[in-house]
Every structure is written in C-alpha cells, then in structure tokens.
Amino acid sequence: MIHENVLLLSLVLMAGVLFAFVYVFIHSTKLEQDYASIAKNSYSKRDKLFGFIIIAGVLIAIGTTRGLPYGPHNANAKQIDVIGKQWYWEISDTTATVNQPIIFNVGSADVNHGLGIYDKDLRLLTQVQAMPDYTNKLAYTFKEAGEYKLMCMEYCGLVHHSMISTFTVNDEG
Ligand SMILES: [Cu+2]
C-alpha cells in the first residue's frame, strides 16, 4: 500500500517537473523585458539567497555539533561492565536505581554475543552487540523498579540459550 502511494507521489512530482520544463520552453521564445533588467533582478535575488544559505548553514552546523562527541558520555552515569563468555554474562554490578543513568560497557571474552535487556514481560528494552577486543557503550536508564533479564541475542554456540542473567532495579531512596 505504501509503495503505491510513494509511486503515485513520485509520478505527481515528476509531472510537476515536466510541466515546469514545458512552461519554460514555451515561454522562452518571448522576450517581454530586456535582458539587463531581468539579470539585475535575478542577481539581487541570488545574492540574498546565498547570504541566507551561508547564515543558515553556519547556524545549523553550530546547532548540530554542540553535542559532540556523540554517544554516551554522561559523567554521572553508573558504569557497569558486562562481558559475554561462553556461556554466561560476567557483570560487575547487577543492581541499579530507578532513573539512574547507566552506561553498560559491553565486551566479549571469546566470540560475538548480543546483550539484550528485557523487562519482566520479556519485552526487549535495549540491546547492543558484545564483541571481542572492543567495548560497546550502551546507555540506558530504567524507569521502573523490578527484575530485568540480560539475555544473549546472538547465537554463540551450544549453550547460547542459557546466557540469562538477572538485573535488579530498586526504587529511589
Ligand atoms: Cu549467545
């Protein structure tokens, strides 16, 4: 259904471009004004447009690069190391507090694993790949107290299915 709508929209836009070309072609033979006045008028518009684009470009560049470096770099976050191993998770701390920002530093001691964090209904909340010789930083803040499950999301061998750990989130105070 969406493909048909996109196709229709594309055709309408293409028809618009075609009509613009045809219009310009038909009117190109008529010279209603002398060239010098048309050029003067157009160049003044062009100069204004260039000025606007330069100012907009600078503002957009400043606005979108203020958050650099991108990624989790919250100095107040709790750092938790999670290492995937065949076939269990080695977790430096399995507790956190509600609304406490956490950065999981995720790696692997052997093969690729996938760290998935699930709530009590086994809904996936967030996930990141666990790779050897590389630390992936996963930023997450739990909004509800309770028991969560850390499970492997990438088939990593015979006992992959038992890579399940429990993570506890406590109420504040
Ligand atoms: Cu696995």
Image: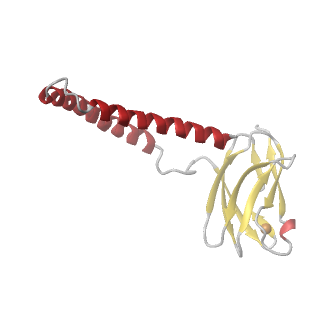
Q: Residue at x 19, y 23 (%)?
A: 32
Q: Residue at x 77, y 53 (%)?
A: 117
Of residues 34 and 61, which is closer to you in this image?
A: 34
Residue 169 location in percent, x, y? 79, 46
Q: Residue at x 85, y 50 (%)?
A: 122
Q: Is residue 92 visible in this depiction of the protein?
A: no
Name the residue at the top extreme: 32
Looking at the picture, does residue 65 appear above or below residue 90?
Answer: above
Of residues 6 and 150, which is closer to you in this image?
A: 6
Q: Is residue 12 visible in this depiction of the protein?
A: yes
Image quadrant in which the N terminus is located = top right
Residue 148 location in percent, x, y? 82, 50
Of residues 100 and 56, which is closer to you in this image?
A: 56
Residue 6 location in percent, x, y? 60, 40
Image quadrant in which the C terminus is located = top right
Residue 40 location in percent, x, y? 15, 28
Q: Which corner quadrant of the figure contains ligand 1?
A: bottom right
Looking at the picture, does residue 32 appear above or below residue 146?
Answer: above
118 left or right of 107? right
Asked where in the image residue 44 lies, by quadrant, the reply is top left
Number of labels in the image equals 0
Of residues 6 and 28, which is closer to you in this image?
A: 28
Task: Indicate the colouring scheme.
Answer: secondary structure
